[in-house]
DNA sequence: CCTATATACGATAGCCAGAGTCCGATATCA
DNA sequence: TGATATCGGACTCTGGCTATCGTATATAGG
């Protein structure tokens, strides 16, 4: 069903870390080592995650000693829909896909499947839902994600 | 991110098939063979899917010749959240889980992870979203899933 | 009773993506 | 020149999804 990649989770932790650090001093840079050590993550994984964030345009990198990463966009301007796209690739809710890349492969039962069209619509609805959530809400400790009454 | 199992898709097609069939005559039974043939699905897969639907309590089965399956609950009373739970198991949006079965295994970075709590909240929000969608909406051809302005 | 038709269900194998590891290349500062 | 970083490919390992096979059980009807 709906589940995040590890990379997505690590990426979120990294973005949160950098956001907090830069809120004090925007010029602060963060190394992969620092994040790996902070959260006890394997260094290689962390490095790969940050590289992905950089390739996605969310952070900036500087090579060499004293190098590291800096956050480019504030977290309240990155939606969960976009973040998932960047981290995990553009995916449809069904394997046969609705209108995303179905022409590439599609499913073998394509011709007789009668729910494909409808699933495409459902996929749109999910995307709209995820577009309404921003990383800032998730990165903050004291967020509520628009909860209404769940007390737990 | 968010994606359905094949079993979930097949199950949806089967429920839709039975729902339509029984809308004419509620006493109609449907065999696995019939569904497999109707949509060109492998018989074994279809049988397994129907068995799962039966174990989930969504449909009733009758053994023997003239046996088959009948829909137990109307599709507008089955939410997508429940259906996904039944077909794919109760899953959390993150591998470390929020409050579902984290005690079982959890993730190894548990102690230092600072987003777990927040992810649990996010998971709740997603579940509420999925609870607001019912299978009837998906099973019908002319549904709109509460879309606002998409003209297609 | 026998047979055709169904469901019930475990065992198994292939496949693929996710996750993690290893190793080396490149860039920059002191 | 050396220490510290990012960059990035190649590889393995694992687990879950998917599908297949074989067999047991239940029931209607002649």
Image: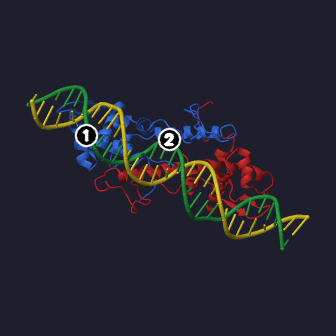
Chain colours: A blue, B red, C green, D yellow
Q: Position of residue A99 (x, y in %)?
A: 58, 33
Instruction: Give me the residue at 21% from left, 38% from top.
Output: A24
| Mark 1 residue element | helix
Q: Quadrant of residue B30?
A: bottom right
Crowd around label 1: few <14 · some 14–19 · many ≥20 (10 Å): many
Residue A105 can be seen in this image: yes
Q: Is residue A105 left or right of residue A5?
A: right
- For the C terminus of chain B, the quadrant is top right
Chain ID of residue with mark 1: A
Q: Which mark is residue A118?
A: none
Task: Please name whichever residue, A117 or A146, is drawn nearer the observer in this view of the structure.
Answer: A117
Label 2 vs label 1: CA separation?
32 Å
| Mark 2 residue element | helix
- Look at mark 2 in the image and give the residue it sits on: A129
Q: Nearer the viewer, mark 2 or mark 1?
A: 1
Task: Please name whichever residue, B27 or B145, is drawn nearer the observer in this view of the structure.
Answer: B27
Crowd around label 2: few <14 · some 14–19 · many ≥20 (10 Å): some
Instruction: Give me the residue at 42% from left, 47% from top.
Output: A145
Q: Position of residue A112 (x, y in %)?
A: 70, 40
Chain ID of residue with mark 2: A
Q: Between disc 2 and disc 1, whose residue precedes? A: 1
- With respect to residue B62, does A38 lie above or below? above
Q: Quadrant of residue B54?
A: bottom right
Q: Mark 1 and mark 2 in contact (Cβ < 8 Å)? A: no
Residue A137 can be seen in this image: no
Q: Position of residue B100 (x, y in %)?
A: 44, 59
Instruction: Give me the residue at 31% from left, 52% from top.
Output: B113
Q: Is residue A86 left or right of residue A26?
A: right
- With respect to residue C26, does B120 lie above or below? below
- Look at mark 1 in the image and give the residue it sits on: A32
Q: Is residue B73 left or right of residue A6?
A: right
Q: Is residue B113 left or right of residue B34?
A: left
């Amino acid at each position: 069903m709906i589940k995040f990649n590890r990379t997505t989770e690590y990426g979120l932790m990294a973005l949160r870390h950098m956001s907090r650090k830069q809120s004090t001093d925007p010029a602060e840079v963060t190394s992969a080592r620092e994040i790996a050590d902070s959260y006890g993550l394997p260094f290689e994984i962390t490095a790969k995650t940050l590289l992905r964030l950089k390739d996605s345009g969310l952070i900036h990198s500087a090579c060499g000693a004293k190098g590291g990463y800096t956050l480019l966009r504030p977290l309240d301007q990155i939606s969960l829909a976009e973040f998932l796209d960047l981290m995990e690739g553009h995916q449809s809710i069904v394997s046969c896909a609705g209108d995303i890349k179905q022409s590439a492969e599609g499913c073998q039962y394509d011709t007789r499947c009668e729910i494909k069209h409808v699933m495409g619509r459902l996929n749109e609805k999910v995307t709209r839902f995820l577009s309404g959530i921003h990383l800032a809400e998730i990165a903050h400790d004291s967020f509520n994600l628009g909860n209404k009454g769940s007390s737990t």
